[in-house]
Amino acid sequence: GAVVSQHPSRVICKSGTSVKIECRSLDFQATTMFWYRQFPKQSLMLMATSNEGSKATYEQGVEKDKFLINHASLTLSTLTVTSAHPEDSSFYICSATGDRVNSPLHFGNGTRLTVT
Amino acid sequence: AQKITQTQPGMFVQEKEAVTLDCTYDTSDQSYGLFWYKQPSSGEMIFLIYQGSYDEQNATEGRYSLNFQKARKSANLVISASQLGDSAMYFCAMREWGLSGGYNKLIFGAGTRLAVHP
C-alpha cells in the first residue's frame, strides 16, 4: 500500500537551533499534507494544511514564522521548527492525501522532537 | 465548539467480546468523510475504517464496523471479537470539504483508550 516516509523519527536539538522534518509520499501524489502535533496522552492537534505549490494554511494559534511549512512538490513537504525552545518538544506527525474528500490518508510514523 | 467528540476517555472490554467506541461530529457541510484510526504506544497511526457522508451502507472492515447515524451525527466504531492486540488509543476524525472546496481539514477527536483484558 501507499507509504509516507517521515524523517527523522527522533531528534534532539539545543535551544535556539532549527530542526527540519521531512514527509515524503513514496508511491502517490500528495496534493495535500496535514501537519499535526501531539502531546503525551492527548489527541493530534492540526497545525497546518499544505497544498502543493501554495502557502500553507495555519490553524489559529500556530505561529507561521516559527513552524515553517514548505510543500514544493507532490511528494515532499517539510516542517521546520525555527529557534526551538523546550516547549516545542513534542511528537510531530504528517499525513498525506489526494484532493478528494474520500482520498485515503496516509500517515508518517512521526518525529519525536526533544529540545534541551 | 468541538467538531469531533469522543466522550469515553477510557474503555475496557473482555477478550472476545464486542465493544463500541462513541463518536459524534458537528458539521454543516453535506460532503464529509469520517475516519477511525488506532494508535498503539509506538505512535503510528493505523487506518481502520472510512465512512463517506453519502454512503448509505455502514462501512465494515473485517472486525471493524462503523455505526453511521447521519441524522444524529454519530459514527460509532464497533470492534467485534476483541483481541489483546486491540489495546490502544482510538481516534475518530472528520475531513470536511467546503461548499466551494475552499477548505480542507482533517480533525481528530480527543480519543478513547481501549484496554482489552484476558
Image (tube, rainbow, N blue to C red):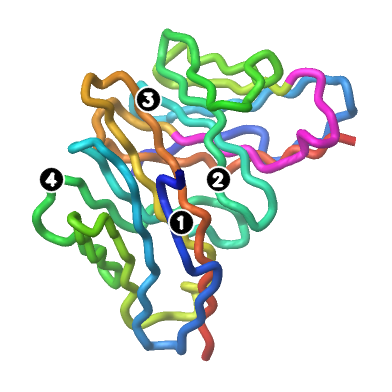
Tags 4 and 1 in contact by the CB under 8 Å rule? no
| Corner quadrant of residue B17 | bottom left
Q: Chain of mark 4?
A: B
Q: Amino acid at mark 1?
A: Phe
Kind of element beneath mark 2:
strand
Q: Which mark is residue B54?
A: 4
Residue underneath mark 3: A30
Q: Is residue B41 above or below residue A49?
A: below
Mark 4–mark 1 distance (CA, rounded to whole Å): 21 Å
Where residue A89 appears, x then y in whole percent? 77, 38
Mark 3–mark 1 distance (CA, rounded to whole Å): 22 Å
In the image, residue B13 lies in the stretch drawn in magenta: no
Residue at position x 27%, y 30% in the image: B97
* Residue, far left: B56
Marked residue nearer the N-terminal end (3 or 2): 3
Q: Which mark is residue B62?
A: none
Mark 2–mark 4 distance (CA, rounded to whole Å): 26 Å
Other residues around mark 2 within 10 Å, as few (<14) / some (14–19) / many (≥20)? many
Direction from residue A94 to residue A113 in the image, left or right:
right
Q: Is residue B26 above or below residue A76?
A: below
Q: Amino acid at mark 2?
A: Leu
Q: Chain of mark 2?
A: A
Q: Amino acid at mark 4?
A: Tyr
Residue underneath mark 1: B91
Camera-near label (3 vs 2) is: 2
